[in-house]
Image (cartoon, rainbow, N blue to C red):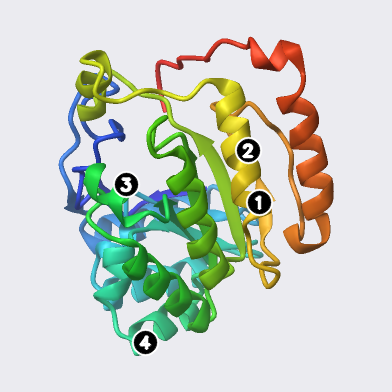
Amino acid sequence: MLIAVTGGCSWNKCKFCGTYKGIYGTTQDYAIRPLEDVLKDIDFYAEKNYHGFPVFLAGGNPTSAPTDYLVKILKYVRLRMKNVQRISSYAKALDILRKSDEELAQLAEAGLDIVYMGLESGSSKILRFMKKGTNAESMIKAGTRILAAGIKLSLYVLLGLGGKEDSDLHAKETAKVLTKINPTIFRFRTLNILPSTPLWKEWKQGDFELLSPVECIKEEREIIVQLGENVTSQVFNDHVSNYVGLESSNIKEDRDIFITYLDSLINNPRIQSLPRKNLDRM
């Protein structure tokens, strides 16, 4: 059940992202919806008997909104909706760092179960090049503070974000950050460059070189291999952009299985010659 809280993205400068840069024919500016409108939406779902569903607070990064505003929404969802399985939302590291530990605890107490945050890469060099607006240290700090507040954390890792030149760096540094955070979940996505993104022009000019499917699989393998022994995260490849569908409920227990399966793909001649998907949307 989607409840719109914010529109657009408060940052909206990442080179690789075109979601709010006209990908669907229009640019969506950042805005926080009036509280009364959000509460009316919740009333609508309650009256239509949409009980028992997970609830997603929609928008590029709803955690950019004031904490008291979010707490009112979370509490109202719990009040009006019966048997809510979970309440979740996207979050940016900068949003989290701007909130105090007390504010994060308030969100957890009000009913925020899990946030989805784009790590993308653990390399500060790559994050800076992609204009992510944060670095590895900030990602680690934000991630550990979310978990300490009692909120689950799902991180997105974007395979191929370092291009061919920085693939090794991307894998190595991403594994380091994942090891330091040990998130509840991390999810792989594969970089797909869309015409509405700033990265498209650089790719067309030859300034950025995309990985092949088998190189993306190799990169995922290296991240898994280099994880610390403390990492017990769930791992998913749950996106149409991926070339692997492998999942784990605990990567510490399934690491060897993961690596063996990825090796089988890497050594498969069919996979070695597989063309890129070149999707036309995120």
Q: Specify which label sits upstream in the sequence, 4 or 1.
A: 4
Front one among 122 and 189: 122
Residue hosting label 3: 126
Contact (Cβ within 8 Å) of mark 1 with mark 3: no
Q: Secondary structure at mark 1?
A: helix
Residue hosting label 4: 101
The reply to whether residue 184 is in sight is yes
Mark 2 residue crowding within 10 angstroms, few (<14) / some (14–19) / many (20+): some
The reply to whether residue 8 is in sight is no
Q: Specify which label sits upstream in the sequence, 3 or 2.
A: 3
Q: Quadrant of the C terminus?
A: top left
| Gap between marks 4 and 1 measured at Cα | 31 Å
* Disc number lying in front (3 or 2): 3
Amino acid type, label 1: Ile
Amino acid type, label 2: Asp
Q: Specify which label sits upstream in the sequence, 2 or 4.
A: 4
| Gap between marks 4 and 3 measured at Cα | 29 Å
